[in-house]
Amino acid sequence: MFTRRHPYLFALLVMAALGTVSMIFFSITVTALTGEPVDSDGEKVGVIELVGAIVDSKQFLEQIKEFREAESIKAIVVRIDSPGGGVGPSQEIYREIRKTAAEKKVVASMGSVAASGGYYVAAATDGIVANPGTITGSIGVIMGYTNFEALLEKIGLQPVVIKSGEFKDMGSPVREMKDDERALLTSLTQKIHRQFIDDIAAGRRLEVDRIEPIADGRIFTGQEAKDLGLVDRLGNFQDAVQWAGELGGIQGEIETVYPEEERPPFIEYLMESALKLVSQSGLTVRHHPEAKWVPTPNI
């Protein structure tokens, strides 16, 4: 065998292989621990995407704070494609954008839709760019639930509720809503609606009287929104980036930078990187086939 005939050569090959593996893992470790900072050379426009329903503000708050503190980021574009979402997260994002706008220029770029909470967020920026056909507006608040009382009666289920206060099970889906409960929830909805209107007026620097007549939940095209003063300019994402760069004082070609993607756990990152290097080197790793779910296309 090779190991018996050439023991010294075999030992050298093993040592060389171990050295190569050690260097690979050292390189991966350094990359994982250091990464590439946002403060790279040159002046840039930071881009943060807000896509889908607004249900959690944590990631957005971290990203805009990072851009606000980065010296190389001279302005920020918030790209919005959202039909709205929760009141709390929308208000948190609104507040953080306002805080950032006091230090750096922030421009909103509306995609397909920026309605309700999506528009709430956009109103906090220094300027809004929308496509002519962007669906926007929907300045309103909605609260709803489904009542299953009749269904439970049909199948013979009787709900039992023990509560500490009269309104503790308000909005229960297993019984009819009382008049005083409806009045209380209506009052709550109207108060939040008032906050919505006041924040939009403040963000857009408009009189409340101009917002109230159109704050009935209706939606507008981007063109209509511009005519109403809800949008500043008509254009696409690149137009928004160009405007933000100009507001930030960037000369020449404008570069954009996105927030760094969240890294997986360190060990997982090492394993994935090692497998990537192995595959790139031409080696193949065999494994047992696994069942995979293939999604079907939707339109």
Image (cartoon, rainbow, N blue to C red):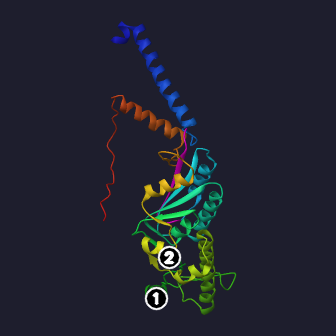
Secondary structure at badge 2 equals loop
Please tell me how crowded label 1 is: few (under 14), some (14-19), or many (20+) other residues with Cα within 10 Å.
few
Q: CA distance from mark 1 to mark 2?
A: 45 Å
In the image, residue 283 lies in the stretch drawn in magenta:
no
Q: Is residue 255 left or right of residue 170?
A: left
**From what the image shows, is residue 34 above or below residue 197?**
above
Whether 289 is drawn above or below 171: the answer is above
Residue on which disc 1 sits: 150
Where's residue 262, x and y in %? 53, 47
Residue 242, horizontal then vertical, whole percent: 48, 53
Whether residue 164 is situated above or below residue 124 in the rendered picture: below
Q: Which residues are magenta?
A: 41-54
Q: Residue 228: which disc? A: 2
Q: Nearer the viewer, mark 1 or mark 2?
A: 2
Q: Which of 25 and 200 lies nearest the eye of the viewer?
A: 200
Element type at mark 1: helix
The answer to whether residue 222 is seen in the rendering is yes
Q: Looking at the image, which is closer to me, 148 or 247?
A: 247
